[in-house]
């Protein structure tokens, strides 16, 4: 029988090792092996993140939707290169290698992965809608149509939106990024 103290130690080792000095790094993974790489990195004590989206697959008269990597062949790993044995990531099953700059891993820009994590819903998929719904009144924040008010016609999972802008007694469709929109009451 295992004592409670040993169980606590084992549980502590399974927690992601993300410290104050940890940064996010990109790793190239083999095609379709994001889940395998993520599982093996977790077993080694690394914290990884794979942004996912819903993908529709048509095959043999069947249509199926399933989660797929937003960046196929890549994942993000939190590392403290001064404290952790980061070279073992390159030998992890499913991982090709870390994206390097010379002899050291190249960190991704600060805040990028944190933004992806913040945009991830409870289902584990990226959600770029920002609370926007079709039919809502929106204001365009930037670009040539800045300050224009329109009606949100369509919003796709990739973050693209179609707004029907009110111009000269008509509605003109404008395609843009959903990050350039804000809902108005």
Image (cartoon, rainbow, N blue to C red):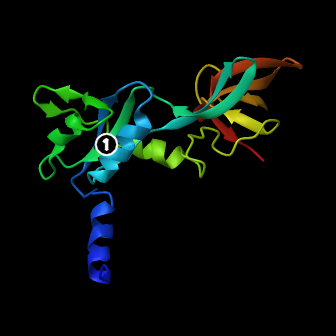
Query: Is residue 155 left or right of 153 when viewed as pictured?
Result: left
Residue at left 58%, top 22%?
143
Residue at left 41%, top 24%?
31
Observer able to see residue 112:
no
Residue at left 89%, top 19%?
169
Residue in the foreground of this view, choosing between 183 and 110: 110
Spot occupied by residue 106 in the image (x, y as percentages of width and height): 22, 32
Q: Name the element at disc 1.
A: strand
Please name the residue that numbered disc 1 is placed on: 77
Residue in the foreground of this view, choosing between 136 and 58: 58
Residue in the foreground of this view, choosing between 182 and 71: 71
Q: Quadrant of residue 167?
A: top right
Residue at left 31%, top 34%?
26
Placement of the N terminus among the 4 image quadrants: bottom left
Spot occupied by residue 5 in the image (x, y as percentages of width and height): 27, 81
Spot occupied by residue 24 in the image (x, y as percentages of width and height): 30, 42
């Amino acid at each position: 029988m295992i004592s409670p103290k040993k169980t606590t130690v084992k549980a502590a080792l399974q927690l992601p090792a993300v410290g104050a000095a940890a940064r996010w790094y990109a790793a190239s993974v083999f095609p379709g092996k994001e889940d395998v790489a993520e599982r093996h990195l977790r077993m080694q004590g690394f914290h990884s993140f794979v942004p996912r989206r819903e993908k529709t697959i048509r095959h043999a008269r069947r249509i199926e939707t399933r989660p797929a990597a937003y960046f196929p062949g890549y994942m993000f790993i939190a590392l403290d290169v001064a404290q952790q044995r980061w070279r073992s990531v390159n030998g992890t099953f499913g991982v090709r290698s870390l994206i390097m700059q010379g002899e050291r891993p190249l960190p991704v820009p600060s805040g990028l992965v944190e933004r992806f994590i913040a945009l991830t819903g409870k289902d584990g998929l990226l959600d770029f809608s920002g609370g926007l719904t079709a039919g809502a009144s929106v204001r365009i924040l930037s670009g040539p149509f800045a300050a224009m008010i329109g009606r949100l016609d369509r919003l796709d999972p990739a973050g693209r939106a179609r707004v029907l802008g009110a111009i000269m007694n008509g509605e003109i469709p404008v395609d843009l990024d959903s990050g350039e929109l804000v809902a108005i009451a």
